Amino acid sequence: MASHAIRSYSYDPERTELTVTFASDRSYIYSLVPPSVFAAFEAAGSKGAFHNKHIRERFPHRKGPLGGEAAAGLREALRASALGGSRRS
């Protein structure tokens, strides 16, 4: 997928939802995205440019779960917090 800004994406045609995960590990779920827009997004030479021009601010969206390294870091921070800030064996 040759994009510096977008790490991954997926589309649910039944719900017409496009999930986009960015290089920052932040993801957004865009609702009411027609299959034709997803097909154009998938075919775009620059997914980031297409997203900015044709998806962002054009479809209702919400923040999705953190992915990859950000989620792992958050899990580790929560684990350390639960252990009183220190690791125990």
Image (cartoon, helix red, strand yellow):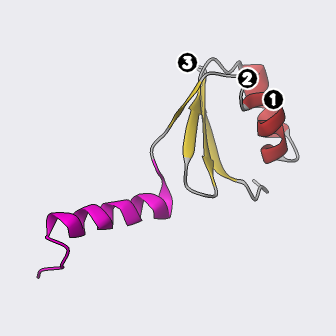
**Rendering quarter of residue 31:** top right
Categorize mark 2 by other alpha carbons within 10 Å: few (<14), some (14-19), many (20+): some
Looking at this view, is 53 or 6 the one in front?
Answer: 53
Categorize mark 3 by other alpha carbons within 10 Å: few (<14), some (14-19), many (20+): few
Q: Is residue 1 left or right of residue 49?
A: left
Residue at 30% from the left image edge and 66% from the top image edge: 77
Q: Is residue 34 left or right of residue 54?
A: left
User: Where is residue 63 drawn, in percent x and y?
Assistant: 51, 37
Q: Secondary structure at mark 3?
A: loop
Q: Is residue 47 left or right of residue 87?
A: right
Counting residues from the N terminus, which is met first, the one under dot 1 or under dot 3? 3
> Does residue 28 lie above or below 61 as drawn?
below
Reading the image, the residue beneath label 2 is 58
Residue at 85% from the left image edge and 40% from the top image edge: 44
Reading the image, the residue beneath label 1 is 54
* Dot label at residue 14: 3
- Spatial CA span between label 2 and label 1: 7 Å
Q: Was residue 79 drawn as part of the magenta stretch in this picture? A: yes
Q: Amino acid at mark 3?
A: Glu
> Does residue 47 lie above or below 60 as drawn?
below
- Spatial CA span between label 1 and label 3: 21 Å
**Rendering quarter of residue 89:** bottom left
Looking at this view, is 84 or 88 the one in front?
Answer: 84
Residues marked 2 and 1 touching at CB (< 8 Å): yes
Specify the segment rendered in magenta.
66-89
Residue at 79% from the left image edge and 38% from the top image edge: 52
- Spatial CA span between label 2 and label 3: 20 Å
Q: Secondary structure at mark 2?
A: loop
Q: Was residue 65 drawn as part of the magenta stretch in this picture? A: no
Q: Amino acid at mark 1?
A: His
